[in-house]
Image (cartoon, grey):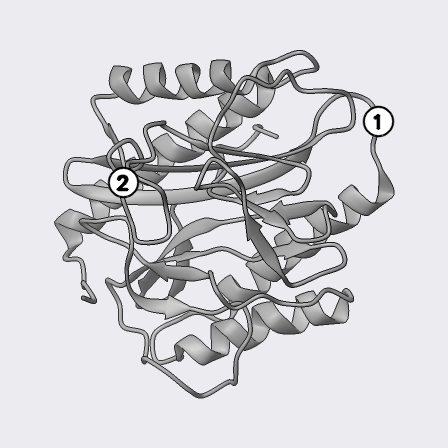
């Protein structure tokens, strides 16, 4: 299903996107050395409830997961890149933490992910991974606009990731979003320009470049959800929800000015 939002729905999407961005930035500021992943999940749950919103994850039960997700946010540490199930783990200095949050409010969902390094240590490999996903994300956004095609976005993202020296996994990528979290069209993190669905004003997309330092192969953790790099290398993940408008692409999950 591909949804095209009307102006009223788009206004609601802006509100949901702003909420997701605010929660993620608050969680980032609280995620320090010693913070437990389960505390991050509890904080996210409290902020979602306080805002009168709903988590897209708690009851989420896709074919690639083991039963309902049961938590409010995905927390990936170091080699965990996607669908990270929160567990009893205190963050250490130098950990690369990815937070992925999807929330629905007033019938419209928004989805965003950030990766950052905890504490004072800044391992160069981790810095490079995060930078590559962020640059690829903004390249994909720049390629989006009315009349462009999904392949234009995929090509822009993949060009940045490949130029940075990373292999690209195509099992998981971006997606349409609207009244539900995951919709068509699929947005691969690599592709050919001029191919695929033609973008229209009112379409919402969640773009999410993610990479692993030295592999393109994923393995599923024993928890049945968390996807890790097959070699144990570090990983990073960046994501924004955007709306296609008459003028281009509007980022709905952009942090407020002055937030990190």
Q: How many marks?
A: 2
Going by the image, does 57 lie left or right of 28? Answer: left
- Dot 2: what SS? loop
Q: Nearer the viewer, residue 80 or 219?
A: 219
Instruction: Please tell me which residue is depicted at 50% across the width and 49% down the height of the picture.
Output: 239
Res 147 → quadrant: bottom left
Q: Is residue 159 left or right of residue 254?
A: right
Residue position for label 2 = 60
Q: Is residue 86 above or below residue 173?
A: above
Q: Is residue 107 visible?
A: yes
Q: Quadrant of the C terminus?
A: top right
Q: Measuring from the top left, give residue 258's x and y in whole percent.
A: 58, 28
Q: Name the residue nearer the viewer: 67 or 99.
A: 67
Which of 136/39 is in front?
39
- Circle 1: element type: loop
User: What residue sits right under mark 1 in the picture?
Assistant: 121
Q: At 18% across and 63% down in the image, what residue appears?
A: 3
> Quick one: label 1 or label 2, which is nearer the N terminus?
2
The answer to whether residue 253 is visible is no
> Taking 164 as reference, is 56 left or right?
left
Residue 195: give x, y in percent of width and height.
42, 87
235 or 226, which lies in front?
226
């Amino acid at each position: 299903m591909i949804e095209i939002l009307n102006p009223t729905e788009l206004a609601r999407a802006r509100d949901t996107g702003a909420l997701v961005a605010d929660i993620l930035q608050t969680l980032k500021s609280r995620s320090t050395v010693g913070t437990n992943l389960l505390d991050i999940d509890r904080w996210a749950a409290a902020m979602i409830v306080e805002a009168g919103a709903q988590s897209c994850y708690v009851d989420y039960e896709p074919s690639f997961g083991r039963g309902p997700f049961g938590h409010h946010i995905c927390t990936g540490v170091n080699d965990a890149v996607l669908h990270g199930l929160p567990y009893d783990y205190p963050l250490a200095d130098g950990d690369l933490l990815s937070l992925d949050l999807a929330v629905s409010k007033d019938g419209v969902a928004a989805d965003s992910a950030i990766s950052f390094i905890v504490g004072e240590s800044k391992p160069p490999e981790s810095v490079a991974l995060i930078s590559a996903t962020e640059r690829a994300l903004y390249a994909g956004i720049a390629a989006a606009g009315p009349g462009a095609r999904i392949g234009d976005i995929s090509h822009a993202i993949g060009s940045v990731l490949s130029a940075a020296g990373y292999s690209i996994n195509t099992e998981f990528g971006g997606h349409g979003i609207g009244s539900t979290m995951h919709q068509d069209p699929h947005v691969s993190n690599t592709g050919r320009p001029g191919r695929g669905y033609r973008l229209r004003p009112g379409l919402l997309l969640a773009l999410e470049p993610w990479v692993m330092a030295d592999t393109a192969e994923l393995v599923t953790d024993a928890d049945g959800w968390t996807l890790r790099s097959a070699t144990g290398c570090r990983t990073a993940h960046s994501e924004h929800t955007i709306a296609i408008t008459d003028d281009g692409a509007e980022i709905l999950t952009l942090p407020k000015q002055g937030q990190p």
